[in-house]
Image (spheres, rainbow, N blue to C red):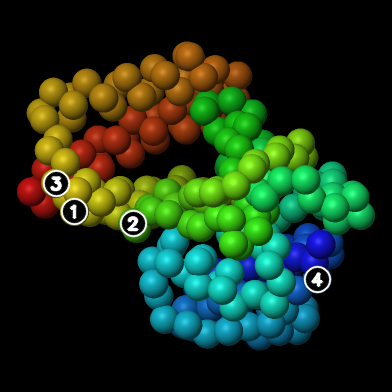
Amino acid sequence: MKITATIITQDEERNIARAIESLRCCDEILIVDSGSTDRTVELAKNLGARVVEAGWRGFAGQKNWAAEQASHDWVLSLDADEALSEALEAEIWSLKKSGPRFDAYTMPRLARYLGRWIYHSGWYPDRKVRLYHRSKARWVGDFVHESVKPQGTVGHLESNILHFTCDSLSEHLRTLDRYTTLAAQELAANKVQVPLWSLILDPPWNFVRAYVFQRGFMDGLEGLIISYMAAFYTFLKYSKARNMS
């Protein structure tokens, strides 16, 4: 079982070294870069990664193209702001030794937000399929929140991908603005109508769900901020979608 790790990048010099250095269990590290103007490509090459430059195809399209360029059929896909935990790396070593019993594997993802690991607020365990045989799975999602759609059997790993999200509220707001635009474009492209009552009621419901039912209050001040941002995300997404229709 040989594995190619794939990472799509654009201006990720802050994150790329951490991601690559966590991938010692992989037999190849492939970076697909779409026009970085910082030191992303230089750092990746210095760390032994193979770098391919390619135009932007959208999140799912870019990740599928990266899998097609891999030297091995097994693909471990990471985002640049993610890394394998040491426990997950050891689990993958063990899987390689014993041999795969499934066509794809999920793993939980643990997020670090404003300097704190988030175990509630709807953010954990946030299981994702990230290790898969490329003949049995593909990325789907044209605009935002892309995910792997397996066509074969799915197993589960128990250790965490580490997701290093926002270090500041300003960064979170910039990210939220970008992703709500993509999400609104997806709604508009699919001709989904957003009624006014959804714009009024869904944001406060999302706050209550994250803070109360998903126990965001146990994540301290950061949980309160995450819950508020969940409501604000919904409000912005729906407002932009209504404006596009």
What residue is rendered at 67% in x and 63% in y? 75
Measured from the top left, where is residue 142 in percent x and y?
34, 58
The span from disc 4 to disc 1 (Cα, nearest Å) is 39 Å
- SS under mark 2: loop
Q: Could you say which disc has been placed on residue 191 in the image?
A: 3
Residue drawn at (90%, 50%), measured in percent from left and top?
98
Disc 4 is placed on an element classified as loop
Q: Residues within 10 Å of mark 3 (few under 14, many from 20)?
A: few
Q: Position of residue 80 (x, y in %)?
A: 60, 63
Amino acid beneath label 2? Phe
Label 1 sits on what residue type? Ala
- Other-residue count near label 1 (Cα within 10 Å), few / some / many at <14 / 14–19 / ≥20: few
Q: Which residue is mark 4?
A: 27
- Verify CB contact (< 8 Å) between mark 1 and mark 2: yes
Would you place residue 51 above or below residue 160 in this image? below
User: In x, y percent, where is residue 23?
Assistant: 78, 63
